[in-house]
Image (cartoon, grey):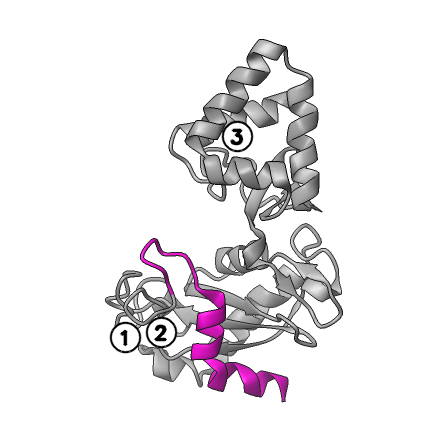
Amino acid sequence: MIRCIVAATAFLMAGGEASDWAAYPERAGKYGTPYTARQLGQAWFNALMLLSDTDRCSLVLTFLLQEKGLFRALLVGKSAEGCMDTNGVVRITGRYKELIIGAGGENIAPVPVEDKIKQLAPALSNVMMVGDNRRFNVALVTLLAEGATGELPGGDNLTGAALEVNPVVKTVSAAMKDPAWQKYIEKAIEETNSDTNVCQNNNWKIQKFVIAPRDFSVQTGEFTPTMKLKRSVTEEMWKELIDPLYS
């Protein structure tokens, strides 16, 4: 546990982000037992108690100065979320403001599910899981398109891996109606739903999806200037695509 805390702290101090463990490829994508904010805070507390007074003070002070918001979240147990992976490493996967609360009160972390789908379907640009106060979860997905930068949404022409799904289909608008694209996305979602390291139970599974006619971007309002997804704004913006999935 101490190694986990020190490694995470060193990584964050080096300029990494809590959700980016690219420096640890052997752990990438291995989501395991979910940890609540309170459990994360307790894990930190337990590990710190095993250190000497000097080391503990040094570690806390350094991390407090470098990552004040995250450290505060861990201490008060309000906004950090995480899990323990198959290697026993406690990791932070996001913030509770990104949690989906299902109609039955289930707490669902969408980021691991979304990331797994994109890993299995590299032709997708963005995946947003929807299910807050809903009977089940659905996904709004966007495809890799020319000119899409995050800042800008790009156009209708597909690019990169998106051109390989069905070589005959060259545009987003055509892909939205294409059976090959439907099967491609369905397969990624089905495999993700079957992965118990990602979907802890049936409440985490995605039942339906829809392809958006363009990518998300800062310019169109789905992303903040720092490229964070504005979930509630995006859900409202695309409600005409999302709501029919619950009909």
Q: Which residue lies at the image location 27% right of the left edge and 75% below the top edge? A: 157
Give the number of the disc on residue 8.
Answer: 3
Disc number lying in front (2 or 3): 3
| Kind of residue sitting beneath label 3 | Ala
Picture quadrant of residue 224: bottom left
For the residues marked 2 and 3, what is the alpha-carbon distance in whole angstroms? 43 Å
Q: Quick check: is 6 in the magenta stretch?
A: no
What residue sits 40% from the left and 74% below the top? Answer: 166
How far from the left and from the top, in percent, is residue 182? 51, 77
Image depth: mark 1 or mark 3 in front: 3
Taking the magenta stretch, the answer to whether it contains residue 233 is yes
Identify the residue under disc 1.
157
Stretch of the chain drawn in magenta: 223-247
Disc 1 to disc 3, how far (Cα)? 40 Å
Residue 242 at x, y = what percent? Answer: 53, 81
> Is residue 17 rendered to the left or right of residue 57?
left
The x and y percentages for residue 178 are: 45, 83
- Which label's residue is closer to the chain start, 2 or 1? 1
User: Which amino acid lies under the numbered mark 1 shown in the image of this protein?
Assistant: Asn
